[in-house]
Structure formats: C-alpha cells, structure tokens
C-alpha cells in the first residue's frame, strides 16, 4: 500500500531547462524530497548555466551529475544511495563524468560520502550553492570538494531561478529557509540551519517576472511559511531586540500574502508548509479577502495524541489543533486541508494511535502524507527515545491511517459532484491524451476532455463523477479571470 495519498512531483525525474547559447558542458540533475529541494535545484541550474552547463535528460552524456537529496526519512536516503550506485556504474564508461551530492544528505553524511564510501567527487550543502564554481574548480584539479557550512543569512534572494522541466503554468517561489522549531523527529534544523526570511521586494520581483512569462500559479515555499518575518534582515530571534520602528515596519506572512495577491490578482497563490503553532488568524482573513489565494492549507499535525505531540516537541496540543481547524472552517468554509502523519513514534500506545484516528475523523482531511517513523541520526528523538514500536505494529497502524484517509478523500471528492468548479489546466492527463488535467483552488485534481482548451487556461468544469482522489467532468467555458 502506498505511504501517501498524493504526490506533487515525480521523484527523481531528470530536470531540464532551455539550453543557453554557447554552453558546451552537460548537467544531469535529479531532485528527491520536498518542494524546497526542487526549488533549490532551479537555483543550482541557474548558477551552473553561468558556468557553461546546459541540462540534459541523458545520464550517459553528462559531464556533471548532481542529486539533490532528502534526509527526512531513511527510505529517501536509501533511494538516493541506489541512484549513486547507478551514477557510478555509468561513470566507469565515462571517466570524465563528475558526481556530486547536494542538499540535506550532503550536510548530514559529508564524511561518509567523501572519506568512507568514496562514491562522489563533490558534496554541497543547502546554503553553499553559490560556492559551486569554486568547488567545480577543485574537482577539475583532482581534489574532492566539500562545502556544507550552514549560513545565518543566505536566502538566494539575488538568484533568478531557472524553471526546470516545468509545465510553464505553475512555479515555486522560496520565501524562507531553515527552521527553528526543533521537532524531535526532524533533521531539517541540522541540515538546513536556522530560520531566516527573504526580502519581500525580491519575492515580488520574482513573482512579477513569472507573471510576465505567462505563469498562472505561484506556490510560496518555506519549511514554515507562517513564521515568515522581514524587518530588514537577520534571524527571527533578533526581532525580539528590534526597535519599535523596525517592529512597526516589519512584514509578516499574512502581509506578504496580501502584497503578492494584490500585485498579481490574476495569478493563483498557494503556500506550503504551515505549522499549526504559527498559523495566525490574519492569514486566514487574508485568504478570505483575496479570491486568488487558493482555499487550501497543508497543515501537518503528525499525531492526534497530545502526549505524543509533547514527545515530538510540537508546540500545540490536540485541543489547540481542533480550535485552529474550527477557525479555518469558520472563516474559510470551502478550504481543503491536508496532513502529515507519523505512525509508530517512540512510546506510542494503542490509545495514542486511536487518538490519531479520532482526530482524522474530526477533520476529515482532503488528502495527506503518511509515514512510518524512522529514526534519524542526530535528532533529539534518536538521542533520547528508544525506537520501541515493533515494525509490524508500525505497518499495521500506518495501514489503518491510510485506509481512513482514503475513506475521507473519497468523501471530500464526492462533495464536488454536481458542482461547477474552476480548474487551472496544467498538463495532459496521465491516462488519456484526449483529456486535460488540472487542479481546483482546493488542490484537488480534475480531469476532463480537451476540446479547444490549452495549458494555462482557467476553465469552469462541471463535475459529473469522481474517484477517491480525482474529479471527472466536462468544461463548460472559461473562468472570468
């Protein structure tokens, strides 16, 4: 059974951008993990385009092979290791090929990659991509190259990302980097560093540039977008010591949402990911005020048990989460909500698991991402808590969570049947070249006959039927956008 109900990206797909005239070297780059990794790969490709590299989908012809990695779960790391084996098998037939590891695994396993396993030429952490030209020079001169130093202020706000392998309709815009929350199960604070926010002016410039290029939907990205805070730079903790003038002129996430939505009223705005402890009511009011901010919130809860939430160092209780859900339903009645859920966290009892199932029954999430707990070295949970839940118990609890989510997903999609909804066409349907696939503001996939429409069109679609995750219907005309 699949561990998650939906998948935003095709993991590991080679990412390609339009060739830059005069470039002669070939870059093959793959990304795994969160949306932030895909966004980072676009930054990397932009930097390397200025170093003479065009991207390629053919591994065998690459001069440089990069894999942008994820450390959030053991399964993700094992997938990357298998890809590295593939790269090195190809490298034997192409000795000039260089292999590099980027991202979270690079920071976490730098010594293993370079000193013990000897399987890569270059290791680059998430805050060191601007150092790539220097690191490539090191590699060309026959030396291993590594830079995994975490930055307190790097946001790449001055880099204009290229758009890799996209559909020309939707794009990511990074607004924060790092995380300060220190959830006990999570490696992100150790692999991506302290939380810092990007200058809002650079965000607006990037959004405006995407609009000028015909993009129709922007997703504002961060490990925790709700804690976005800009008052002239620096770490969030420094805000406590800021002057009253700085506080008065600070830009919060709710204000950033309003600025972006107002600047491009004909573009859909999404955001991810939210942390329940940091989501404020003014964000919900901003969503209600602007029709182009999508009625969809990814709101990870991880567990329905207050005791387990405390063990995870999540700064909210079960009851506080319910209160937030109620407030969302009050202000945004049509808002879709999705979740992250971990089964089998250390010390989790059957009663804790039942709390998770009952929380899901209360919310009835539209979709979600569900995983078994896997211990991540270096985290507080790994240091302080024994991974004491048997594998069979984890699997059984995960399957119960997935089955309940499938039931709720079917319930949510069924609510659309008989209604006419706006859909932004993104691409051809995977199952039929005679149909388009797009998403509603609630992030639900809809499929319908192509007729004379094209990707990037906002279309009103009458929903006649559905599966547990997909709406089926027919277009009845263009949206008024």
Image (cartoon, rainbow, N blue to C red):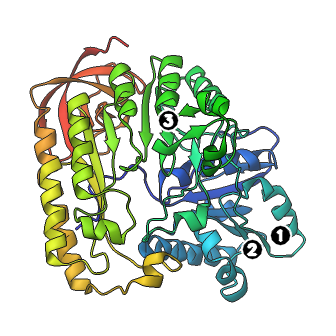
Residue 363 point in image, percent of width and height: 17, 48
Q: Out of 244 and 173, give the one closest to the viewer.
A: 244
**Neighbour tally class for label 2: few under 14, some 14-19, many 20 plus, Cα within 10 Å:** many
Residue shown at 62% from the left, 61% from the top: 193
- Do the numbered discs 3 and 1 sit on residues whose CB atoms are within 8 Å? no
Label 3 secondary element: helix
Q: How far apart are marks 2 and 1 (CA)?
A: 7 Å
Please name which of the two marks, 3 or 1, marks the residue nearer to the observer: 3
Residue 7 point in image, percent of width and height: 35, 53
Q: Please, is residue 130 above or below residue 188 in the view?
A: above
- Mark 3 vs 1, N-terminal side: 1
Residue bearing mark 1: 139
Give the quadrant of the N terminus: bottom left
Residue shown at 86% from the left, 68% from the top: 138
The quarter of the displayed image where residue 343 is located = bottom left
Q: Out of 367 and 246, give the one closest to the viewer.
A: 246
Label 2 secondary element: loop
Give the quadrant of the C terminus: top left
Q: In the rendering, which numbered label is found on residue 121?
A: 2
Q: In the rendering, which numbered label is found on residue 4?
A: none
Please name which of the two marks, 3 or 2, marks the residue nearer to the observer: 3
- Do the numbered discs 2 and 1 sit on residues whose CB atoms are within 8 Å? yes
The quarter of the displayed image where residue 108 is located = bottom right
Q: How far apart are marks 3 and 1 (CA)?
A: 41 Å
- Mark 3 vs 2, N-terminal side: 2
Say whether residue 154 is visible: yes
Label 1 secondary element: helix
Q: Is residue 133 left or right of residue 289?
A: right
Residue bearing mark 3: 253
**Neighbour tally class for label 3: few under 14, some 14-19, many 20 plus, Cα within 10 Å:** many
- Residue at the right extreme, as displayed: 141
Residue 451 point in image, percent of width and height: 28, 21
């Amino acid at each position: 059974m699949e561990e998650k109900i939906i998948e935003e990206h095709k993991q590991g797909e080679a990412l390609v951008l339009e060739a830059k005239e005069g470039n002669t070297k070939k870059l093959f780059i793959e990304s795994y993990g969160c949306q932030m990794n895909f966004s980072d790969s676009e930054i990397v490709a932009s930097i390397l385009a200025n170093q003479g590299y065009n991207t390629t989908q053919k591994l065998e012809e690459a001069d440089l092979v990069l894999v942008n990695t994820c450390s959030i779960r053991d399964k993700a790391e094992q997938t990357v290791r298998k890809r590295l084996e593939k790269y090195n098998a190809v490298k034997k037939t192409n000795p000039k090929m260089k292999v590099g590891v980027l991202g979270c695994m690079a920071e976490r396993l730098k010594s293993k990659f370079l000193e013990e396993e000897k399987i890569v030429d270059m290791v680059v952490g998430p805050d060191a991509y601007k150092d790539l030209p220097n690191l490539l020079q090191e590699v060309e001169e026959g030396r291993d190259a590594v830079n995994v130093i975490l930055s307190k202020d790097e946001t790449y706000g001055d880099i204009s990302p290229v758009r890799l392998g996209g559909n020309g309709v939707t794009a990511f815009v990074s607004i924060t980097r790092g995380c300060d929350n220190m959830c006990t199960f999570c490696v992100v604070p150790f692999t991506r560093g302290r939380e810092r926010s990007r200058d809002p002016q650079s965000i607006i410039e990037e959004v405006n540039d995407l609009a000028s290029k015909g993009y129709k939907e922007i997703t504002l990205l961060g490990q925790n977008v709700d804690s976005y805070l800009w008052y002239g730079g620096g770490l969030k903790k420094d805000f406590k010591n800021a002057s009253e003038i700085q506080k008065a002129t600070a830009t919060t996430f709710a204000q950033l949402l309003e600025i972006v939505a107002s600047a491009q009223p004909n573009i859909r705005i999404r955001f991810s990911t939210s942390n329940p402890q940091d989501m404020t009511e003014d964000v919900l009011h901003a969503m209600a005020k602007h029709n182009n901010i999508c009625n969809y919130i990814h709101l990870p809860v991880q567990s329905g048990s207050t005791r387990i939430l405390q063990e995870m160092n999540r700064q909210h209780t079960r009851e506080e989460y319910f209160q937030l859900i109620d407030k969302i339903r009050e202000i945004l009645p049509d808002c879709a909500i999705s979740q992250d859920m971990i089964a089998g966290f250390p010390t989790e009892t059957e009663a804790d698991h039942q709390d998770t199932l009952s929380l899901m029954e209360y919310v009835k999430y539209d979709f979600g991402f569900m995983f078994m707990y896997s211990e991540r070295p270096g985290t507080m949970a790994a240091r302080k808590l024994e991974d004491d839940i048997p594998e069979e118990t984890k699997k059984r609890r995960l399957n119960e969570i997935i089955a309940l989510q499938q039931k709720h997903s079917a319930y949510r999609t069924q609510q659309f049947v008989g209604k006419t909804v706006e859909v932004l066409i993104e691409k051809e349907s995977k199952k039929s070249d005679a149909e388009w696939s797009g998403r509603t503001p609630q992030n639900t996939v809809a499929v319908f006959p192509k007729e004379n429409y094209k990707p990037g069109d906002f279309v009103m679609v009458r929903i006649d039927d559905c599966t547990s995750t997909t709406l089926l219907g027919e277009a009845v005309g263009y949206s008024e956008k």
